[in-house]
Image (cartoon, helix red, strand yellow):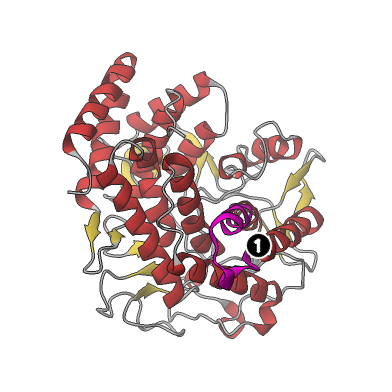
Amino acid sequence: MFYTKEIIEHWLTDIQKKTADHPSWGSVFERCYTDTLDRTISQLEDGTTFVLTGDIPAMWLRDSTAQVKPYLALAGKDETLRQMIVGLVERQMAFILMDPYANAFNQAANGHGHQSDHTQMGPWIWERKYEVDSLCYPLQLAYLLWKATGETSHFNQTFFGAAEKIVQVWKLEQHHENSPYSFERDTDRLEDTLTHQGKGAPCAYTGMTWSGFRPSDDACIYPYLIPSNMFAVVVLGYLGEIAELFASEEFSDLAEGARQLAQEIDQGIRTFGLTKNQAGETIFAYEVDGLGNQSIMDDPNVPSLLAAPYLGYCSKDDPIYLATRRTILSQENPYYYEGDYAAGLGSSHTFYRYIWPIALAIQGLTTDDKEEKARLLDTMVACDGGTGLMHESFHVDDPTLYSREWFSWANMMFCELVLDYYDIRPEE
């Protein structure tokens, strides 16, 4: 057991009391919150933590972070829970040292996953789609764990070695033409492979860092993914703060290197990542290539443009963000769907007119309007397909039609929005 039963039970009793005005929220919260604890987490032989994504038998660097973030509110009180998260950070960083280009890993060196892909696979690697956000999330978790609990034991040699590797990869991928990375999959689904002999679409230098794939695991059309670069700016700032306080002499240049790279990427966003919507307002593009091409859209997976304030890149009232938000949540976004039961963001990764609970949660987490938060929570509960759990996506006209029976990331995003609604934060 990776938590103290009495502490968790007392916590859940408190949540039930707080949600007495919305009992359906409390019921789904408890099921989602305990499902991740009881069914997705395991300890490896070295004492580190492995977090299963759900109905796919692998751990994503992105998902595993999002799956445990709601536990930070309790980790300061529960030592067992806190050490579970410490173990996850150690496992994430060990995986990054193993291969910073991989997005998902096996629980053991068993050779499971997409071993036939044309890239440098290994027995620990489930999938090797390079996504900038896969390197952002472990840095975010390490930082938030420290800030929420005061824990610093995870700032060790493994952490700083992996952090140094992340900075090196992001700097290299500012000039993707020099990169050793390529990826091709034998498939009819174009979103699952990279063009141009596995190197991706042509691009020019922008200061941003290149990404092969989106956080949906679908290929980028234009390889500078603005939301992921936003996230990189934020976590590089975190890394600068961490390295300045805790890095050994061996990593003495890490803090300054992280901050310099953050400035270069942010300048790239501000120079190449802005465009105009149909109303003539300045907004953030979703992807660009530095050659003049760009896309106006958003995807429900985080990082997304909708999530920019949630990630810490800008404020909720930033004028460019607000214009971007209005654009995303309208028909100008080709993946925005409205139906009889719900409206929200869909994805090229799932079926037409299927929207994602993750994006509904982000919509709530990026507004200060309590009524909007409540409406979104009501929608998420009403559209759970009668399961009491969240799913990857559901049809806006028929929520009994959904993808992925068990998707822990979505479950925990629902929990995060409930905690946000009731102003429950980690005790710093």
Q: Is residue 50 at all visible to an observer of this figure? A: yes
Q: Are there few (<14), some (14-19), or many (20+) residues within 10 Å of tag 1?
A: many
What x and y, as percent, mark residue 287?
67, 59
At 69% from the left and 59% from the top, the residue drawn is 259
Residue most extreme to the front: 249
Q: Amino acid at mark 1?
A: Ala
User: Any magenta on residue 229?
Assistant: no
- Residue at the extreme top: 21
Q: Position of residue 400 (x, y in %)?
A: 29, 39
Identify the magenta region: 235-254
Please indicate whether residue 18 sits to the left or right of residue 358 in the image. Answer: left
Residue under label 1: 258
Image vertical order of residue 319 relative to residue 355, above or below:
above
Is residue 289 or residue 206 the one in the foreground?
Answer: 206
Tell me if residue 22 comes above or below residue 68 in the rendering: above
- Residue 237 highlighted magenta (yes or no): yes
Say which residue appears at 47% left-offset and 63% top-offset.
217
Residue 214 sits above or below residue 68 on the image:
below
Q: Position of residue 221 (x, y in %)?
A: 62, 66
| Residue at the image point whose x is 39% and y is 29% from the top | 418
Would you say the magenta stretch is mainly helix, strand or loop?
helix
* Left or right for 219, reference 78: right
Residue 17 picture quarter: top left
For mark 1, give the secondary structure.
helix
